[in-house]
Amino acid sequence: MKEPLRQQLEFGLKQMGLHYSVEMQQKLVHYIQLIARWNKTFNLTAIRDVEEMVSKHLLDSLVVQPYIEGSLILDVGSGAGLPGIPFAITSPDKKFVLIDSNGKKTRFLVQAKIDLKLDNVEVIHQRVEDFQPMEEGHRIYFNVITARAYAATDDILKTTAHLQDDDTRILVMQGKLDRQIKSEQYQLVDSYSLDVYGLDAERQLLEIKRSPILEA
């Protein structure tokens, strides 16, 4: 492992008020090195330079980690595992389900799970609309659903509706802020402006929940 990458990561994390163990930081660096290696043939991400990945992939994902609550999290359209794998590395006590319909990307996710020894990750190769998780005959609902560069907000809400209950928090990562939600079934709980060290671009986070049912 190239030590300067971990030092770059550690410095960026400190600037953002985030603190993770050296072991976690090493796994995070190993992860982006895996992306860089697989990128040569699988085209996982447009970013080719591993040093750029520190800010544009790792820090850009981990800035949302403090908002992750609950024990079961779904990362929709996970792609190369962003933000799901950085979350899983830094929150080993939580379970993360990473779903994507692209076979090449899910093959990478499975290999990353093995190489990084992430027992708290489950990889699903499927369209999220068709995903019907069950446990002991009961439907599973997620505590948190995350989406980064996946789809328009209303599309995210619609395609994951069957995976939500009234307590599910949907966290949508955006560039330019767009607080509009067309569906009256949902409400915007809050929006957060995110400061990502080393990234000269706007970053926003929407927190959305189902609207409470009003009794007549």
Image (spheres, rainbow, N blue to C red):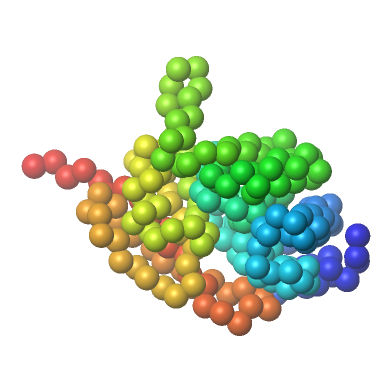
- 37 or 212, which lies in front? 37
Q: Residue at x 58, y 37 (%)?
A: 124
Farthest residue, direction front = 41
- Asked whether, in this view, residue 154 is left or right of residue 114, the answer is left
- 138 or 82, which lies in front? 82
**Image quarter of the N terminus:** bottom right
Farthest residue, direction left = 216
Q: Position of residue 133 (x, y in %)?
A: 48, 29
Q: Is residue 73 above or below residue 44?
A: above
Count how many numbered circles sit on residues in the image. 0
Can residue 211 be seen here?
yes
Q: Quadrant of residue 117?
A: top right
Q: Is residue 189 above or below residue 142?
A: below
Q: Residue at x 43, y 36 (%)?
A: 130
Can residue 32 be seen here?
no
Q: Residue at x 30, y 66 (%)?
A: 180
- Asked whether, in this view, residue 141 is left or right of residue 28, the answer is left
Q: Residue at x 68, y 78 (%)?
A: 198
Farthest residue, direction bottom = 200
- 176 or 125, which lies in front? 125
**Image quarter of the C terminus:** top left
Q: Quadrant of residue 103?
A: top right
Q: Is residue 44 above or below residue 158?
A: below
Q: Position of residue 36 (x, y in %)?
A: 77, 61
Q: Position of residue 20 (x, y in %)?
A: 75, 57
Farthest residue, direction top = 136
Q: Position of residue 151 (x, y in %)?
A: 44, 58
